[in-house]
């Protein structure tokens, strides 16, 4: 019985240690890796159309955090249309979710 309780306690301890805070993981794995360029590319972007990119990327790859306690901000883009008049503007339609709040 002691042997069983010891293994149960060790399993629970390793599970809780292995679960890191999601914003911390994002900072470590994406932002601090250096994959994001420090230079501004804004002037070269209006000539390109990124509308299909935003609707074909899997939802779990779209990262965002909101608030002082860094709540996970989930976004599902249903439709993205590049504006004909202003090439730097996109009309975006979709859903967002923070905790249980769905908009």
Image (cartoon, rainbow, N blue to C red):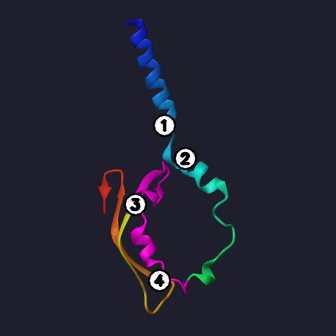
Q: How crowded is mark 1: few (under 14 residues within 10 Å), some or many (20 or more)?
A: few
Between marks 1 and 3, how big is the CA–CA gap? 21 Å
Residue 89 appears at what percent x and percent y? 47, 83
* 63 in relation to 50, above or below: above
Q: Which mark is residue 89?
A: 4
Quadrant position of residue 73: bottom left
Q: Which of marks 4 and 3 is nearer the N terminus?
A: 3
Question: Mark 2 — residue?
Answer: 25
User: Please, which residue is most extreme toward the bottom here?
Assistant: 85
Image height check: is 54 above or below 21? below
- Residue, disc 1: 19
The reply to whether the C-beta atoms of the residues labelled 1 and 4 are less than 8 Å apart is: no
Which of the two discs, 2 and 1, labels the residue nearer the N terminus? 1
Residue 48: % across, % down: 53, 83
Give the residue drawn at x 51%, y 39%: 20
Q: Total marks drawn?
A: 4
Task: Please provide the residue range marked out in magenta.
Answer: 46-75
Task: Indicate which label's residue lies in the foreground, 4 or 3.
Answer: 3
Give me the residue at 41% from left, 18% from top: 8
Foreground mark, 2 or 3, reads 3
Check if mark 2's residue and mark 3's residue have beta carbons within 8 Å: no
Question: The residue tagged with tag 1: helix, strand or loop?
Answer: loop
Q: Distance between the residues labelled 2 and 3?
A: 18 Å
Give me the residue at 55% from left, 87% from top.
47
Q: Is mark 3 on a helix, strand or loop?
A: helix
Q: Work out which quarter of the rendered image holds the N terminus and state it.
A: top left
Residue 57 picture quarter: bottom left
C-alpha gap between disc 1 and disc 4:
39 Å
């Amino acid at each position: 019985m002691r042997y069983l309780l010891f293994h149960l306690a060790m399993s629970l301890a390793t599970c809780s240690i292995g679960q890191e805070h999601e914003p911390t993981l994002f900072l470590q794995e994406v932002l601090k890796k250096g994959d994001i360029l420090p230079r501004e590319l804004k002037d070269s972007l209006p000539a390109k159309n990124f509308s299909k990119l935003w609707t074909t990327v899997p939802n779990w790859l779209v990262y965002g955090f909101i608030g002082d306690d860094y709540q996970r901000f989930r976004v599902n883009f249903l439709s993205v249309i590049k504006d004909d008049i202003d090439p730097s503007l996109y009309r975006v339609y979709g859903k967002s979710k923070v905790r249980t709040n769905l908009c």
